[in-house]
Image (spheres, rainbow, N blue to C red):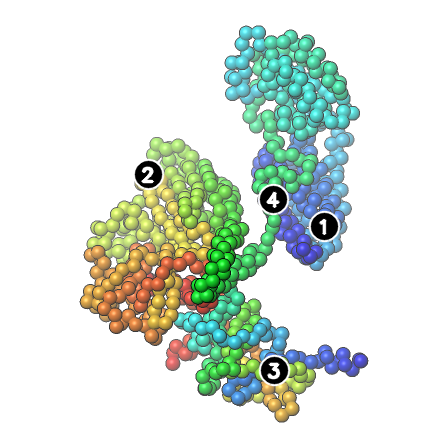
Amino acid sequence: METSEYLRVFMDECREHLQTLNSSLLALENDPQNKEILNAIFRSAHTIKGAAATMGFNKMADVTHNMEDVLGLLRRGDVEVTPEIINLLFDAVDLLEILAGGIPEGREADIETAGIVQRLKKYSTREELTPSTRDRRRTLELRYLKEEQEQLKKLLTGEKKLYHLHVILREECLLKGARAFMILREVEAAGTIVKTIPSTKELEDERFRYDFIIGLITDEPLEKVVDIIRRVTDVKDVRGEEVAPDKLPEERRGSGETYCFAVQKEKEDEPSAPVATAQTGLTVRVDIRKLDDLMNLVAELVINRGRLQKISAELQHEELEESVEHLNRLLLELQDDVLKTRMVAVEHVFSRFPRLVRDLAHRAGKQVDLHITGIETELDRTVIDEIGDPLIHIIRNSVDHRIEPPEERVAAGKPATGQLSVSAHQAGNQVVITVADDGRGIDSKKIADTALAKGYITPEQLAEMTEEEIINLVFLPGFSTSEEVTDVSGRGVGMDVVRERITALGGQVLLSSVPGEGTTVMIQLPLTLAIIQTLMVQVGSEIYAIPTTLVDQTISVARKDIKILRRQEVTMLRGEVLPLVRLQDVLGVKDARNPEYEELDVVVVRHGERRVGCVVDSLLRPQDVVIKSLGSYLGNIPGIAGATILGDGRVALILDLRTVAVA
Amino acid sequence: MREKEEVREELIQLVLFKLGEEEFGVNILQAREIEKLDQGLTRVPKAPSFVEGVINLRGEIIPIVDLRKRFGLTLPPLGYDSRVIIVEVDGALVGMLVDAVEEVIRIPASAVEPPPPITKGVDSQYVSGVAKVGDRLIVLLNLERALSPEESKELAEADLSE
């Protein structure tokens, strides 16, 4: 890698972590006690520090280093999270952003950092200067949660007693983590350790000052246990006391006064990389364009393989055929692997939802619990980039329109808090995303009335429609119920836009609802946009690919079964009138042969509620194709979704027949 | 030595090609490559009429523009010498169909003069200048204009209204 490459990677990483810092600080402002958020802030600052130092960006490294010191104090609870500190941290992040701004030119922006650094230092050194804060914090107390108390009482039978052993190590003790571990091991031999403060994990990780308390259940006398501990090197003092089962100190969950039981999960003082690898495995950042290039190369290889196969078949050379076959298998694997590298977890999109739902619920005066599952489900990068907005729209609809205000819910005999779930899972080569709420549901009668009033359907059509079909009318262009129009966020964009976006991705969206019980929106998406399933058809001398997501079925129609209805060719398909479109008329193909045929091959295309039969010369084959853009020069041509390269190197266009269907 | 450097600074390199019998030039910095049109073109329905179709250039889809149609020149069908010059315009690759590619020449920038209103039947809006090289008159194309998709749209609409 060239230096500029490193720079770009660093920039990417930096940008991401600065963003995390900003959003996490915002979150911390609202939830100052939340250690998870503090940890996230700490990790981001730490990562930037490490990366900046490696790249020789000393100012950034210095600022983050000092941020880290302050954050460390906050994490240990030595200093309280105050608006003043949050503002200071925001200032530091702003400074980092300015510094990072100069990096594309290879150096940090020229700006004075001493001011911020000094302000940060004031906090980190203040701790040393005011031992009173420390002393208050150092009063360790071992307390128990309600559940823990219950369990303890069960354990304390017969001769067994509960001791609290306050162990104090010498300040000069070097490997205090190891010491603590030794002490725990010795004590464990004498009984059962029920709880320690700080937690055993923190003790082993050396995340404690010089003392800790062990809660031990044993039938040994107290003196003996104290003696065991005293024998360990570097122990300065041990104070033991017996605690009566009915006088267990109670821990109130979330109280800031005592150490919480095992609040910190991540190690803090080691480089962050090992932590990350433990969770996500080794990763490398790659520019998405490089992956696209790789995809193109693989596609080219596939095409060349086709040529080779043809040649080897002609030559009938056994060894050549074998090696071409081998090449074939390798290529399939390669294609598969390259596709996989473009996959991204839906977490990238879903992570925005908690904040979104909270804000929406707050604004609408509603109470909503959000449950998210399946965040690890992967989708192609291109799909991920596109599904965010439609999902946000669906969620917004749920919170704004479907989940009732608390009073209304209670009146209806439901819990005041509404439930909203967003889940994702893979099913075959599709990913299904479901957004479900337990709100008031959709009033199909209202939908039907609106559809009739706006002339979307006739009363006769309505009579034959199922409940679900009626509900799905909301996806029709321009459709929105009066209820939605009066609401603030429901105005303008309707569900038709959602459907538009999803189908543009080759997906489908379905709505189902039980009045009074809730609504479920199910979205099916292809795993990748790069490869789609198509049906290859021929019209005249031209070959076109029709995405199978749009294909309802293929039928054969005899010429005598074609009638003319209002100057439109139609045929009957299972009792329904199916309009027919000669594809050559739509595409301007001059040498089409189907007008001469007695039996016509027809591809029935379905778009929403409409079906149209597209007459072609012949159906060739189903084929998975790598979809390519026609490029910015041609831009969007109505009716053309893209192009693909056939085995012989020629280009075939991928049709978007939705425009035909609505025409 | 000094003189040589001065001269070099003022030189521009042109790819010369023919539409019919007329000579045109594009700056070599804009030309990516020159291809023989040995694969079939795929016609694109509803594309502007001067877009002959698209080809596959090592995995990329490239639109091919017939400059002769673009300029409204009536000329014999493409022949053996026909080539596609792939150029980059506004970040997009476009292939220009020409009757022949002749050579690459260097000319002093000072040899380029502003275009007369109509040059060899080509509207001056598509021309950035004319260059006299010996007794040859070379028309330098303004590719941004000559291939501009916006212009293309106007023309496509004009085509439709005909």
How many numbered badges does the structure rendering display? 4
The chain ID associated with circle 2 is A
Residue indicated by mark 1: A55
- How many angstroms separate mark 3 from mark 2 (CA)? 78 Å
Residue hosting label 2 = A516
Alpha-carbon span between mark 1 and mark 2: 59 Å
| Residue at image point 68% right, 39% down | A271
In the image: residue A474, left or right of residue B27 = left
Tell me if mark 1 has few (under 14), some (14-19) or many (20+) residues whose alpha carbon lies within 10 angstroms of its own.
some
The chain containing the residue under callout 4 comes to A
State whether discs 4 and 2 lie on one chain. yes
- Chain letter for mark 3, please: B
Q: Residue at x 51, y 61 (%)?
A: A301
The front one of A13 and A390 is A13
**Residue A489 rendering spot, x and y as whole percentages:** 43, 49
Give the answer, above or below, for where A263 lies relative to B91: above
The one of A578 and A99 positioned closer to us in this rendering: A578
Amino acid under disc 1: Met
Location of the N terminus of chain A by quadrant is bottom right
Residue A639 to residue A107: above or below? below
* Precedes in sequence: disc 1 or disc 2: 1
Residue wearing tag 4: A282
Secondary structure, mark 3, is: strand
- Labelled pair 1, 3 in contact (Cβ < 8 Å): no
Cα gap from disc 1 to disc 3, whole angstroms: 48 Å
- Name which residue type carries label 3: Glu
Q: Is residue A34 left or right of residue A168?
A: left
Classify residue B88 by image quadrant.
bottom right
- Real-space Cα distance between discs 3 and 4? 52 Å
Q: Are marks 4 and 1 in contact (CB under 8 Å)?
A: no
Horizontal and vertical percent for residue B1?
Answer: 80, 80
